[in-house]
Image (tube, helix red, strand yellow):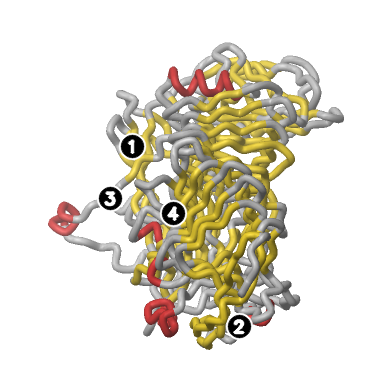
C-alpha cells in the first residue's frame, strides 16, 4: 500500500512510496531497502518512490542524489542499473518495422548510481518513478538520498545573496563578503557551501529573507530559484536547538508548534542539538521527533528492530536538553528514536546503534506519549500523568529461544532476568499512566516483536490494562534507574500482578508461573502504601523488597512470594562475564499480612529481616522448579517462613 511522505515541503510536489524505509525532511528524502535471509535461499527487496507534479502547470523537477547500490540496483522509470553491470548503447538490431515502432513505447529510463544531479520536466499531473532493489540477503542494503528537491517554473530569477554574519559561505566557489546579485534561468543551479567560522556559532539554514521560509538546511549543495529572491546564510549560537516545522526552521519550540498547528503539520523534527531556553509545550496532535540518524525516521508506539548478534549501543546522533528550572510539557508525542537489537543471542531486545537522546535536568511532564526508544537521562524528573503512555524496550538478559519459550522449560517462566534501560532519569508514574514495552526476539531464523500480536508487555498500568504493577486511584510508582540498579518506590494501593509475553508465536503469562523480580531491582513499599502480591513472584539474587514503617505487604491466598539465595543466580552467561550476586533480601519494618506462602531458598533465613517481627522457619519445605544459567531446569528446595510479633513466644 502506497504511503505519502507528508514531511516533504516542496510546493506542488507530492511523493508516495511502497515498500522499503523512506523518510522526508523539508526538501530531502532518504530511502533504503534490505534483502531478506531465507531458510533455503536469500531474496532481494524492492522499494518504489513516485513523485507527482500537482502544481497545475508544467514544472522542472530537480534534485541532487547520492546512491549506494551495495550489490543492488536503482532505476528511473523502467530503466535499471546494477552495481555489477555496465550500461551499454549499441547500434545493433535498431531496424524495426513501422508497426513495431507504433506498438512500442519509448524507453525513457535513466541509470542512477553514485552521486550527481538530476532534472526533468514534468507535465501537470506527470510522475517520476524511482525504484531501488537490494542485493539478496540481510547483509545487503541499497540506499538513496535525494537532497535539494525543487519543482520550478521555466523562468529567469534575480537572486541576491547577503553578506554573512557569524560565519562564511561561497557561491560557485566564490566567497561572499558583501551583498551579491545574480540573474539565472531556473534550470541553472547555485553551488553553495557554508562554514561556521565564528566561535560559539553553528550553521542554521539558507533562508528566504522576504518570506522567512527555509530554502535548505544542508551546509552545501545546489540551490535553484524560479523567482526573484534574497537569500541569507543564517548562523545561530551553538547551544540553540533547531526545529523543522512544516518546512520552516525555528529556534523556539513553542513557535515551531504554533507554526505546525497553523499549517496542519503533525511532526516537528529536531535537526540540530541544543538546550531549551524556556518552558515549552508540545500540543496535542503534534509529535516532536529526536532522530537517531540521518534518515530522520520517527517511531512512536513501536520501534524498528535490527537483526544482529552485536550487543552494544552507539552514540547520540542528536540531543535535546531540558535544563534545570525548565519544564517541557507534552500533550502530544515526543519520540526519542532508537533501534532495538535481536538475533541468535541471549541478550535480546536492547538498544542498538546510534540513537536520539533527551537529557532531562529540569522537568518533563507527559500527558500524551513518551516514546523512549533512544535514551532519556539526566538529573531531573519525568512525570507520567493520568492518560499518559510511556514506551521503552524490554531488554532480556537470558533469552533461551523460541522452543524453550513455547514449552515453558518444564513449567518455568522462561524470561528470568530483564531490564528497562532507556530511561535513566527519576520517573514518576501516576495513576492512569501506562508503562508499555516492546520485546524483540529471534526464533527459527525470524525476528518477532510482541507489538505484532498484542498491545505490548505492560509494566505499569491500571486494572483495565494490567501489568506487573497495577495502580489504584491515587497511587504512584517512582522508578529511578542509574545504569546499574533500579530503585522502585511505591505509594498508595498497588497490586503486584503479572506480565504477559506474546512473542515467537506464543503468549505466556507469568500468572501461570512465578514472576521473577530481576537482579538490580530494589522495591520499597513506602509508609501508607499497601502492596498486594496477587500472583506468585520471586526476588532474584541481587534484588530486594523493603516494607517501610507504616507500609503494608499482603500475600494473597494461593500466591507464593519467594526470596532466592545467591546460589540460584539464573542469569545466562553465554555473552558477558558475570560477577557473583548477593542473595535477595526481604526487609519488613511495616505490616505483613500473609495469606499465601512466604518462602526462602536459605534454610537459615539469613536473607529475611524485620525490626517489628520475629522471623522463623515453619518447618515446611517444598520443591519449586527454577532456571539455571545453562538454561536447564532444576528443583529448588525452599523453606516456608513464619512472622511473629516481637512479643510472641514460640512453644
Cα distance, mark 3 to mark 4? 35 Å
* Residue sitting nearer the eye, 10 or 622: 622
Per the image, the residue denoted by label 1 is 52
Cα distance, mark 1 to mark 2? 58 Å
Looking at the image, residue 487 sits to the left or right of residue 98; the answer is: right
Disc 3 to disc 4: CB gap under 8 Å? no
User: What residue is at 48 percent from the left and 27 percent from the top?
Assistant: 246
| Mark 3 vs mark 2: in front | 2
Cα distance, mark 1 to mark 4? 47 Å
Mark 3: few/some/many CA within 10 Å (<14, 14-19, 20+):
few
| Mark 1 vs mark 2: in front | 2
Per the image, the residue denoted by label 2 is 629
Q: Position of residue 398 (x, y in %)?
A: 56, 74
Of the two numbered discs 1 and 4 on the same chain, state the one appearing first in sequence: 1
Per the image, the residue denoted by label 4 is 467
> In terms of image quadrants, where is residue 215?
top right
* Circle 3: element type: loop
Of the two numbered discs 3 and 2 on the same chain, state the one appearing first in sequence: 3
User: What residue is at 43 percent from the left and 35 percent from the top?
Assistant: 387
Mark 2: few/some/many CA within 10 Å (<14, 14-19, 20+):
some
> In terms of image quadrants, where is residue 598?
bottom right
* Residue sitting nearer the eye, 187 or 170: 170
Per the image, the residue denoted by label 3 is 1
Of the two numbered discs 4 and 2 on the same chain, state the one appearing first in sequence: 4
| Mark 4 vs mark 2: in front | 4
Amino acid at each position: 500500500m502506497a504511503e505519502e511522505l507528508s514531511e516533504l515541503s516542496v510546493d506542488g510536489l507530492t511523493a508516495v512510496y511502497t515498500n522499503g524505509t523512506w523518510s522526508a525532511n523539508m526538501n530531502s528524502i532518504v530511502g533504503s531497502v534490505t534483502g531478506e535471509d531465507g531458510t533455503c535461499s536469500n531474496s532481494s527487496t524492492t522499494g518504489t518512490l513516485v513523485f507527482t507534479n500537482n502544481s497545475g502547470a508544467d514544472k522542472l523537477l530537480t534534485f541532487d542524489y547520492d546512491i549506494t547500490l551495495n550489490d543492488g540496483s536503482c532505476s528511473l522509470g523502467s530503466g535499471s542499473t546494477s552495481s555489477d553491470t555496465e550500461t551499454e548503447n549499441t547500434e545493433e538490431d535498431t531496424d524495426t518495422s513501422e508497426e513495431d515502432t507504433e506498438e512500442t513505447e519509448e524507453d525513457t529510463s535513466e541509470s542512477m548510481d553514485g552521486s550527481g544531479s538530476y532534472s526533468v520536466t514534468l507535465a501537470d499531473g506527470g510522475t517520476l518513478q524511482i525504484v531501488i532493489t537490494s542485493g539478496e540477503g540481510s547483509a545487503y542494503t541499497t540506499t538513496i538520498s535525494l537532497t535539494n528537491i525543487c519543482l520550478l517554473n521555466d523562468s529567469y530569477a534575480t537572486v541576491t545573496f547577503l553578506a554573512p554574519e557569524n560565519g562564511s559561505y561561497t557561491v560557485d566557489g566564490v566567497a561572499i563578503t558583501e551583498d551579491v546579485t545574480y540573474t539565472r534561468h531556473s534550470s541553472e543551479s547555485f553551488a553553495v557551501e557554508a562554514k561556521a567560522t565564528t566561535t560559539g556559532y553553528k550553521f542554521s539554514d539558507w533562508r528566504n529573507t522576504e518570506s522567512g521560509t527555509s530554502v535548505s538546511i544542508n551546509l552545501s549543495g545546489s540551490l535553484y530559484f524560479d523567482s526573484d529572491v534574497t537569500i541569507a546564510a543564517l548562523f545561530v549560537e551553538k547551544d540553540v536547538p533547531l526545529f523543522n516545522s512544516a518546512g520552516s526552521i525555528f529556534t523556539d519550540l513553542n513557535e515551531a508548534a504554533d507554526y505546525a498547528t497553523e499549517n496542519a503539520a503533525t511532526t516537528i523534527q529536531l535537526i540540530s542539538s541544543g538546550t531549551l531556553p524556556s518552558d515549552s509545550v508540545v500540543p496535542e496532535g503534534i509529535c516532536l521527533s529526536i532522530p537517531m540518524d540521518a534518515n530522520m525516521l520517527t517511531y512512536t508506539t513501536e520501534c524498528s528492530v535490527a537483526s544482529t548478534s552485536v550487543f552494544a549501543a552507539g552514540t547520540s546522533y542528536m540531543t535535546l536538553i531540558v535544563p534545570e528550572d525548565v519544564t517541557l510539557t507534552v500533550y502530544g508525542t515526543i519520540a526519542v528514536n532508537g533501534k532495538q537489537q535481536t538475533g541468535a543471542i541471549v541478550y535480546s531486545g536492547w538498544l542498538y546503534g546510534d540513537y536520539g537522546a533527551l537529557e532531562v535536568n529540569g522537568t518533563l511532564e507527559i500527558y500524551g506519549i513518551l516514546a523512549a526508544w533512544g535514551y532519556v537521562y539526566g538529573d531531573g524528573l519525568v512525570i507520567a500523568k493520568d492518560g499518559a503512555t510511556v514506551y521503552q524496550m524490554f531488554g532480556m538478559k537470558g533469552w533461551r529461544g523460541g522452543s524453550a519459550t513455547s514449552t515453558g522449560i518444564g513449567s518455568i517462566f522462561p524470561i528470568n532476568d530483564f531490564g528497562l534501560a532507556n530511561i535513566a532519569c527519576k520517573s514518576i508514574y501516576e495513576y492512569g499512566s501506562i508503562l508499555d514495552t516492546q520485546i524483540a526476539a529471534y526464533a527459527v531464523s525470524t525476528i518477532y516483536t510482541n507489538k505484532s500480536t498484542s498491545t505490548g508487555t505492560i509494566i505499569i498500568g491500571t486494572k483495565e490494562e494490567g501489568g506487573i504493577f497495577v495502580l489504584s486511584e491515587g497511587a504512584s510508582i517512582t522508578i529511578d534507574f542509574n545504569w546499574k540498579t533500579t530503585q522502585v518506590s511505591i505509594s498508595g494501593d498497588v497490586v503486584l500482578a503479572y506480565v504477559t509475553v506474546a512473542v515467537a508465536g506464543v503468549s505466556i503469562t507469568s500468572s501461570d508461573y512465578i514472576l521473577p523480580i530481576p537482579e538490580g531491582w530494589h522495591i520499597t513499599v513506602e509508609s501508607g502504601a499497601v502492596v498486594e502480591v496477587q500472583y506468585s513472584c520471586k526476588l532474584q539474587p541481587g534484588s530486594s523488597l523493603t516494607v517501610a514503617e507504616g507500609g503494608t505487604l499482603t500475600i494473597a491466598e494461593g500466591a507464593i512470594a519467594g526470596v532466592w539465595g545467591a546460589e540460584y543466580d539464573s542469569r545466562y552467561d553465554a555473552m558477558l562475564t558475570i560477577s557473583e550476586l548477593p542473595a535477595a533480601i526481604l526487609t519488613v519494618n511495616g505490616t505483613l499480612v500473609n495469606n499465601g506462602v512466604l518462602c526462602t531458598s536459605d534454610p537459615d533465613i539469613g536473607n529475611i529481616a524485620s525490626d517489628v517481627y520475629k522471623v522463623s522457619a515453619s518447618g515446611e519445605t517444598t520443591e519449586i522448579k527454577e532456571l539455571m544459567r545453562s538454561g536447564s531446569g532444576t528443583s529448588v528446595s525452599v523453606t516456608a517462613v513464619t512472622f511473629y510479633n516481637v512479643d510472641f513466644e514460640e512453644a
